[in-house]
Amino acid sequence: MRYLEVIVWSGLSIVAAVGGITIWLAYRKRNSNRRRLPSANEWQHLGTLKIINFYPVKGGAPIRLEQVECSEFGLHSSGIWERCLMAYDESGAVVYSGSYPRMLSVHPEIVSEMVLRLETPNMSPIIMDLSELLTEPYAVVEKRENGNVSRLVECRAEHHVWLSRAVLQREHGLRLYVKLKPYPGEKLDIAPVMVMHERSVHDLNERLSGKTKVDCQQFRGNIVVDSNANIPPYNEDNWLWLRIGTDVESSVVMHYNSDCLRCILVNVNVENYTRNSDFEPLRMLKKYRLRQNSREPTMGVYFDVYKCGILKIGEQIYVNYA
């Protein structure tokens, strides 16, 4: 009897092992296919690139651009890279507009190569010369959050004071840093480019009937897609590849990374920097967009950059579906 039990258990172990290997091979094959660049006849026309938002200041207002360079690390223009300025509060936490809504009042403007001007209502603007701040030798500060390391160079005292006044209405409390560019091939804390589908925001506004409407800007996407009339809302749930540009050789190509999970940030009005008292649109999104977990709804998609290039307003966008 014991001999038979051994045979049975041995057989079951072999079956389990073979099954596990089969599943693993299928998973590996599927992921390999997902990373395969689509052939010319596998692209479908999706629409046009309507808006380019560039965010030099993490948590701050965007710069609207007509065109922008797109690299493996995201958008950059005039030597300035995405979210190159980051603030931390007195507790050591990263400052973002969900916790500090008045960060949205900080409006950057590109003055020249690696030079930004920061503006906010009722205050004089301040100039940020990144090349001056990053002149060797400079001290690098490392800050860790959720397993990711940010390499930072602290800005000057007048920059800390200006930002604290703009956001907190007092002389101190925030410290501003330049976040150094990633090393080639370095893993990023978030995917380089976030894409919004305008038709999905329109559908959300219809569901918010009788309540305050929201703008695409509240979702802080880098790219806003104006899709063709036959494309339904939330079609982005199935976008695997995006190609931006009609000419295949010069077009930018992106590959799906993850859905964008939404928090209280989307409840902050980008015009008056106040939170919605009805907890909208997050409350509504939780009613029908809890695709991945029971707490955070999805709206927008993160993409990795597969092929770098120049993005321009009005360019044609093509999609390959998952």
Image (cartoon, helix red, strand yellow):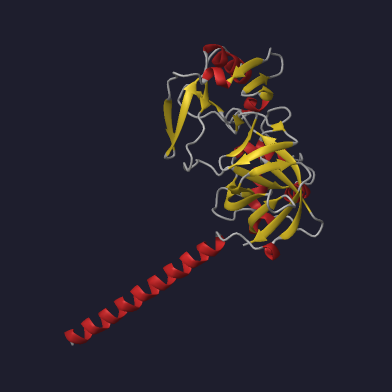
Vertical position of residue 202 compared to residue 162: above or below? below
Relative image position of residue 42 (x, y in whole percent): 68, 64
* Residue lying at the far front of the rendered structure: 249
- In the rendered view, does 202 fall on the left or right side of 127? right
Task: Return the residue nearer the eye: 239 or 77.
Answer: 77
Residue 23 visible somewhere in the drawing: yes
- State how many labels appear: 0
Residue 279 visible somewhere in the drawing: no
Relative image position of residue 107 (x, y in whole percent): 68, 24
Q: Residue at x 64, y 24 (%)?
A: 113
Relative image position of residue 79 (x, y in whole percent): 61, 29
* Residue lying at the far right of the rendered structure: 229
- Quadrant showing the N terminus: bottom left
Q: Residue at x 61, y 49 (%)?
A: 307
Snapshot quadrant of residue 144: top left
* Residue lying at the far left of the rendered structure: 2
Snapshot quadrant of residue 95: top right
- In the rendered view, does 184 fall on the left or right side of 314? left
- In the rendered view, does 180 fall on the left or right side of 65? left
Relative image position of residue 198 (x, y in whole percent): 75, 47
